Amino acid sequence: MTPSSRFLNPAEAARRLGVSAKALRLYEQRGLLVPARTAAGWRSYGPAEMARATEIVALRALGLSLAQVARVLKGDAQGLAPALAAHQAVLEAKARELDATLDRVRGLRDELARGRLPAPGELARLLQPDTRPALEFELPWPWPWGGERFALSEIRPINHIVGPLGSGKTRLALRIAERFPGAVFLPLDRAEGDATATRLREDAALRSRVDAALAWLVEDGATGSEALTALLAGLEAEGPAAIVVDMVEQGLDHATQEALIAHLRRRGAEARPLFLLTRSSAFLDLAAVGAHESILLCPANHSPPTYVAPFEGAPGYEAVATCLATPEVRARTQGVIAWRPKVSDPAG
């Protein structure tokens, strides 16, 4: 390996670190990271720079702001103690969940030793301990479905709803919002009018949460905008048991989508469920889907929605992949709807 091959360009470094290239530039602007330069003056990240960047990303993952990260890197550990305490609480919760799962495994093995097979659904619950109780309802009818009974069997903190144009995904999302107790629906026009500004003026606590989330996202490379503020106002609202968002990427650029999904993933396994309609490959990167996420596909042939595992070869994976497009394509086709010409009556 030659010395030059150990250095990465900004895009490669960002991909390896799991952040955006814009975030790397922000770290540089804040004086946290100083990339090397090639003979032509291009930014380059070698082992020392990558080690430093890895520390920054790890501290950010613990919940520290960039100002706190800077202080920790200078040797001031004051802001690190509460972050580690919060991380410890998350790990302890996972440990309790794991202990409960181990108890179930021991019980199943004892049953097998007595010649008894597991009860229906017991193995599925064992393999998916973080799923919530199923929500059952009739699918919308007469279009695109016929009122079939449907169960949301994998309600997780993040639930992606995907489908091609005209597949009925918005109608499904509306039905989920109707039938999920305490859920709210955030429509496409959430950034229009003065409703968001009024809410934030009247609710100081909500304003504080939105400002904190917005500051965090901008530090991660997001672009502040009216669309992002309106979305955060809905996501940070107290009270809803679940939030259903129509086209979560609406009005958000590539870096903002990447920062937002990273922010939502940091909420942890106990966060309230989010149902997020999307057709963006930046927001829904199939290679990055975590254990606390599910993908629900609305097929083009209007068969009932189905869960899709996020790995190549899984049933429905290719269909999901073909539904997703880059933010640039999504912006170009924003507002486009599926249109089916009326079939003339041959007897008319």
Image: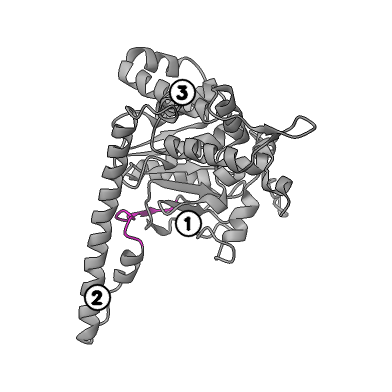
Q: Nearer the viewer, mark 1 or mark 2?
A: 2
Q: Amino acid at mark 1?
A: Gly
Q: Earlier in the sequence, mark 3 or mark 2?
A: 2
What is the secondary structure assignment of the residue under circle 2?
Answer: helix
Residue 318, position as x, y percentages in the image: 62, 59
Q: Are marks 3 and 2 in contact (CB under 8 Å)?
A: no
Q: Position of residue 142 (x, y in %)?
A: 49, 51
The residue where tag 3 is placed is 215
Structural distance between the alpha carbons of marks 1 and 2: 39 Å
Q: Quadrant of the N terminus?
A: bottom right
How many angstroms separate mark 3 from mark 1 (CA)?
Answer: 45 Å
Q: Which mark is residue 108?
A: 2
Vertical relation: 282 (above or below) 238: below
Residue 103, percent across and down? 21, 67
| Magenta span contains residue 196 | no
All told, the count of numbered labels is: 3
Left or right: 149, with 98 as reference point: right
Give the quadrant of residue 24. Answer: top right
Q: Is residue 129 magenta?
A: yes
Is residue 25 toward the left or the right of residue 343 in the image? left
Residue closest to the eye, 348 or 288: 288
Disc 3 packing (10 Å; few <14; some 14–19; many ≥20): some
The kind of residue on which mark 3 rests is: Ala
- Of the residues tagged 3 and 2, which is closer to the observer? 3
- The stretch of residues the image draws in magenta is 128-139
Q: Main secondary structure of the magenta part?
A: loop
| Residue at the spot 62% in from the left edge and 42% down from the top edge | 13
Say what secondary structure mark 3 lies in. Answer: helix
Which amino acid, by three-letter code, is at mark 2?
Leu
164 on left or right of 202: right
Say which mark, if any, is on residue 146: 1
